[in-house]
Image (tube, helix red, strand yellow):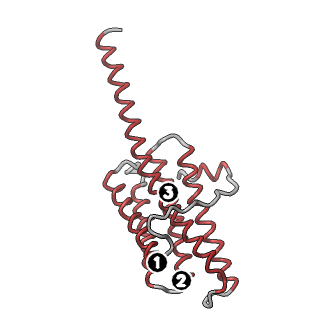
Amino acid sequence: MSEQNHGQAAGTSSGAAEHQESEDVFRASHLARAQSAASRAAAVLRHVEGLGADEKHLDEAAWAEILFKAKHAARVAAQAIAVLCESQPNPAADSRCARNAAAAASQAAQMGQLCDDGSELAAAASRAAVKAAQAAGAAAVAGAQGENETLNAEADAAERAAVAAAEAIGWIRPGERIQLVSTGTRSADVMAMMHF
């Protein structure tokens, strides 16, 4: 091999390693945000389950619907984590999984707000969850490809704010690690769609 070819091969190898390292860094960031959002969704589900239909402002049918939607949201968030963890690092796809988890956590927060019957803290937690979902969506748009550091930083900040708001209402205790719900029956087609 000539020196020139050897240099090109070394450069290609070095470039590939740097690219892989970059993808791993982005994966860690998207995964952390997705796990945080999924934990928020699971925490709201726990909160809803703990209230039950005994709350005077909810009848049995209303509580059952809220519980169903909270369970669905927590499961979708868990599925987004599963898809992310089972695939090869890919910032664009990983950011979409983080977006899906944040969107599911936003839906869960809306169910928590309904259970808490107009509480200002619950409304603030729901608004923060919506903002986190919007920021995660912005970080996952086609132009960003999950690699825009500014958008990722904004999404991380919005996720931290959503966690703080969930702690303020008592859905999560500070520093608590919430066990994610089961992903349930996993359709290959549905799981593949979680990337989009």
Badge 1: how crowded within 10 Å, few (<14), some, or many (20+)? Answer: some
Query: In this image, 190 relative to 170: left or right?
Result: right
Along the line of sight, the residue nearer the viewer: 128 or 144? 128
Please determine whether, in this image, residue 194 is positioned above or below residue 135: above
3D distance between C-alphas at marks 3 and 1? 20 Å
- Residue at the (57%, 74%) spot, across then down: 47
- Name the one closer to the observer, 148 or 34: 34
Horizontal side of residue 177 vs 124, given as left or right: right
Residue drawn at 59 percent across, 71 percent down = 46
> How many numbered circles are shown?
3
Residue 71 spot, x, y in % from top left: 63, 68
Q: Which residue in the structure is indicated by mark 2?
A: 116
Identify which residue is drawn at 47% across, 58% down.
99
Q: Report x, y in % for residue 97.
A: 51, 53
What crowding class fits label 3: few (fewer than 14 Cα within 10 Å), some (14-19), or many (20 or more)?
A: many
Residue at the disc numbered 1 = 169
Instruction: Determine which residue is flagged by label 3.
Output: 35
Q: Nearer the viewer, mark 2 or mark 1?
A: 1
Q: Quadrant of the N terminus?
A: top left
In 3D space, how far apart are the residues under numbered discs 2 and 1 (Cα atoms)?
9 Å
Instruction: Give the amino acid at mark 1.
Output: Ile
Separation (CA) of disc 3 from disc 2: 24 Å
Q: Amino acid at mark 2?
A: Asp
- Which residue type does callout 3 highlight? Gln
Q: Callout 3: helix, strand or loop?
A: helix
Q: Earlier in the sequence, mark 2 or mark 1?
A: 2
Of residues 1 and 177, the one drawn nearer to the viewer in this rendering: 177
- Residue 24 higher or lower than 190, as above or below: above
